[in-house]
Every structure is written in structure tokens, then in C-alpha cells.
Image (cartoon, rainbow, N blue to C red):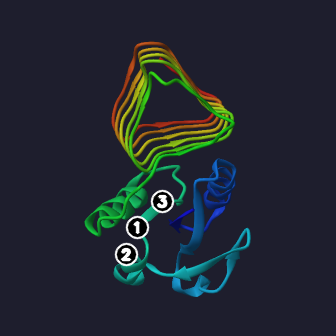
Amino acid sequence: MKEIILFGGGGHCKSVIDVIESEGIFRIAGIVDKKEKLGESVLDYKIIATDSDIEKLREKYQYALITVGQIYTSEIREKIYDVLKKYRFELPIIKSPHACISSHSDIGEGSVIMHGAIINAGSRIGKNCIINSKALIEHDAVVEDHCHISTGAIVNGGVHVGKGSFIGSNATTKQYIFIPPNSFIKAGSIAK
């Protein structure tokens, strides 16, 4: 089984761990977080390193995944992504076996598709995205890089979500609209 290092040991990390375990492709070798958290565990996986150890980690591990969450801004996730790419880590696509993903969709590296998510035909998900539990990405929708489509959110057909955007829990978009980059759509709202 391939080994993977996770970057970020908070609440989102726990949810991603569950998906990785369910998928059964990777074995989690450890987690990277702040210095003061070294030695702590997240769901029985140790925090083994900090950002300053990245070069040593790359010598030992080929695969990495960003498990820092995203609400107000994608800035932290984007910075980690750039560093991981600089060190030539491979960022796999992590897909829950409990998600429904069309074979006619496209998903970028480092993106995570959580339990119960639905990604329909003709849709395109960018790099380093979170498609959270029970989110729906309808036909022909585009979600650009570094976006978080939160729990239960609905991105309707033909919608284009700009880079770095956040769509909150249970928010719904009208079909065929453009959501500008770095947008924040609050939970329960309707984007039209």
C-alpha cells in the first residue's frame, strides 16, 4: 500500500482520514502540523513533522495531501499546495467509495471528494478542492482550483465557480451563473 503524508491536523483532517481509510489505496504515514503539536495524534495517526521538515519528508515520501480546512479564504491551502508542488510531491485525488462520481467528470490533483458527494456528467473539479459531504455538483458545472464546496451545498448545472471560492453548507446556486474568484457564499443562501 502506498504511503501518504497529510498536511494539517485539525477537524477537516479527521474527515479526510476517514475517506482515505474507506478508499483503501493509501496508508497514512503521519501528519504535518505546528511544532507545539508534535507527538500528538489525530485519530491514532501521529503528528510527526512541521513545515520546516518538508525536504526530509520528500526524501522518504512521494505522496502528500492538504488536510487543512477552508472557510473564509483559500490562501493557506494555496500556499501549502505551491510548496508541495515545489518539492515535487504527488497529490492524489481522494474519492470516497460512498460518493457518486460520473465517469464523464474530471477531477484535478489533490482534490478530495467526501462521503455522499455527487459529481455529475460533464462537470469539472479543479486542483486542491474540497467537495464536502453530501455536496452536489450538477452536470456541466466547473469548480476552479482551490475551492471548497461545503456540506450539502448544491452547485447547479452549468455553474462556473471561480478559483478560491467557498460555498457554505446547504447553499444553492441558480443554474448557469458565474461565481467570481474568491467568493464567499454563506451557509443556507441562494446564489443567483
Provide the residue designation for mark 1. Answer: 62
**The N terminus lies in quadrant:** bottom right
- At horizontal 41% and vertical 83% (from top left) the residue drawn is 53
How many residues crowd around disc 2 within 10 Å: few (fewer than 14), some, or many (20 or more)? some
The residues bearing labels 2 and 3 have C-alpha atoms spaced at a distance of: 14 Å
Q: Are marks 3 and 1 in contact (CB under 8 Å)?
A: no
Q: Is residue 175 above or below residue 103?
A: above
Which numbered mark, 3 or 1, is in the foreground of this view?
1
How many residues crowd around disc 1 within 10 Å: few (fewer than 14), some, or many (20 or more)? some
Q: Earlier in the sequence, mark 2 or mark 3?
A: 2
Left or right: residue 107 versus residue 113 is left
Question: Residue 58's mark?
Answer: 2
Image-quadrant location for residue 79: bottom left
Q: Is residue 131 above or below residue 160?
A: below
Residue type of the residue flagged with mark 1: Gln
Q: Are marks 2 and 3 in contact (CB under 8 Å)?
A: no
The percent position of residue 154, horizontal first and vertical second, equals 58, 24
Please tell me which residue lies in front, 171 or 159.
159
Most extreme residue toward the front is: 1
Residue type of the residue flagged with mark 2: Arg
Left or right: residue 182 versus residue 148 is left
Provide the residue designation for mark 3. Answer: 66
Element type where label 2 sits in the image? helix
Residue type of the residue flagged with mark 3: Ile
Is residue 7 something one can see in this rendering?
no
Element type where label 3 sits in the image? strand
Please tell me which residue lies in front, 53 or 176.
53
- At horizontal 36% and vertical 79% (from top left) the residue drawn is 59
The residues bearing labels 2 and 1 have C-alpha atoms spaced at a distance of: 6 Å
The percent position of residue 127, horizontal first and vertical second, equals 38, 44
- At horizontal 59% and vertical 39% (from top left) the residue drawn is 150
The percent position of residue 171, horizontal first and vertical second, equals 60, 28
